[in-house]
Image: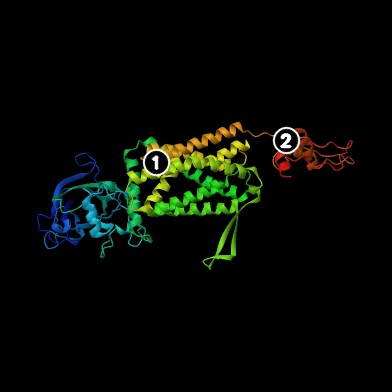
Amino acid sequence: MNLHVYISEHEHFTDFNATSALFWEQHDLVYGDWTSGENSDGCYEHFAELDIPQSVQQNGSIYIHVYFTKSGFHPDPRQKALYRRLATVHMSRMINKYKRRRFQKTKNLLTGETEADPEMIKRAEDYGPVEVISHWHPNITINIVDDHTPWVKGSVPPPLDQYVKFDAVSGDYYPIIYFNDYWNLQKDYYPINESLASLPLRVSFCPLSLWRWQLYAAQSTKSPWNFLGDELYEQSDEEQDSVKVALLETNPYLLALTIIVSIVHSVFEFLAFKNDIQFWNSRQSLEGLSVRSVFFGVFQSFVVLLYILDNETNFVVQVSVFIGVLIDLWKITKVMDVRLDREHKVAGLFPRPTFKDKSTYVESSTKVYDDMAFRYLSWILFPLLGCYAVYSLLYLEHKGWYSWVLSMLYGFPLTFGFITMTPQLFINYKLKSVAHLPWRMLTYKALNTFIDDLFAFVIKMPVMYRIGCLRDDVVFFIYLYQRWIYRVDPTRVNEFGMSGEASTAAASVAEVPTAAGALPPAPTTTTAAASDEASTPLPAKPTQGASSANEPQEAPPKPAEDKKRD
């Protein structure tokens, strides 16, 4: 068979006599031949420079028209002696790509100067912040699928059905032609403008197996249920570039490790999410937990959400961050008593929300330590915030004062976020205990942090992100150190007057069977009280004589904090 490739400005090609339109002609190709060609792989290629028509320079389209004919035939229908319908198959496609170029007009808020290209500024003033521009990629591959499947019209599954063409008379299908640009990276596209006199184009022809064609077709097909617009798919194409680069440039063993680690990361992320909700949902006491850190976390989540909305980040990321904000807001209802004041409404329409500390937080020493930690924290936090704000204002460009505030509030926690975690470390130090922490959730998050460390140094990441990973590592190692030095003491009496040894002893006594007529075992509370008296250093009131097992026992001694409150 013969291959004819034409380049034209028109979507429907008819000018077969124009020699300038003929880009490539290759004869004596064999269907399903995998051994011919320069590299003995069945592939051929042709390279040439295309003269750019004026319409294409002015954001017009350009098309490639591919014709396969049996040897001895011609694709021009006007050549009656050389043309035959069943001996010709063709496919056309636009080879330039329209992409949105966004211009963010930024400047130094103090001086008004900018480092942006003056030409870009002028185009933004003429066409607006978003301009649709024709882009060019110098490579395209023409595949003919080596397939002998007996397809029947109407039974070809999507997305393959759009590539299989059937003859209306015989019912047979033509050889399948597929334009393959999967490996054309988005970063390699460049805009077509009036400054370009010609365009380079390399066209390759290769056979393609059925299963590889199915993979390519599935990856390149857009969903028919696209309700989010083309912008989401543009972002998706750009994000797929990182996957393609990893497949092309990464060591196969490291790539396999990355895939496994990604799956593990997703599992740990789900487990951390589940255990975090379970911990706060079942938590009855706030002893040892920093309530202010929860509020600071809500503030950070709001800042991140506003920041990614201002920077037009991926829609999927926006949804995930929004869900995180909702979860953080839900946590407020677990650490505070939230009520709606319907008597004093906001603007006379909406009930006013009121917040009140829970009794388990107010009546504990945790509130004192929490206030103390944030007071010490403010001595470090506010000077650093001021320095970062001055640096951002002097040396960075912003779209406006709103963007400056968001970028400052976003960049500061990312850089110095470990400082906001210190109140919980301080409370642990003062209480000499870490038993109140959700260790299962913290462990899953720590494992994810170590996985993020691997990604941060294998994949190209911003420096700020790597600093954030290092920050989380340091904080978790401090938590581990506190868990080691504040080990669980089975003799320590908690705020309810119970100890670990007492609970163990009570359980063992309850399991001992009694003989017929024997005295019943002492109640659990009595055993616990006796164990507490033996294990705690606090003095207990002396009993009046010997007490039998069925006589009432005295209540266990109160811990020091309860006595102080009394």
Note whether 274 is above or below 251 in the view shown. below
Query: Number of marks in the image?
Result: 2
Residue depicted at x 51% and y 39%: 446
Residue 274: x %, y % from top left? 55, 48
Residue 232 relative to residue 63: left or right? right
- Residue 94 visible in rendering: no
Residue depicted at x 36% and y 36%: 252
Q: Quadrant of the C terminus?
A: top right
- Residue 234 visible in rendering: yes
> Which residue is tagged 2?
501
Q: Tell me which amino acid carries mark 2.
A: Glu
Residue 151: x %, y % from top left? 33, 57
Residue 459: x %, y % from top left? 37, 39
Q: Nearer the viewer, mark 1 or mark 2?
A: 1
Q: Which label belongs to residue 464? A: 1
Residue 42: x %, y % from top left? 23, 43
Residue 402 relative to residue 545: left or right? left
Which residue is at the front of the view, 96 or 422?
422
> Disc 1 versus disc 2: distance between alpha carbons?
48 Å
Give residue 168's quadrant in the image.
bottom left
User: What secondary structure is marked by label 2?
Assistant: helix
| Furthest-top residue in this view | 485
Local crowd at mark 1 within 10 Å, few (<14), some, or many (≥20)? Answer: few
Note whether 97 is above or below 345 in the view shown. above
Which residue is at the front of the view, 183 or 135?
135
What's the image's color scheme? rainbow
Residue depicted at x 33% and y 60%: 152
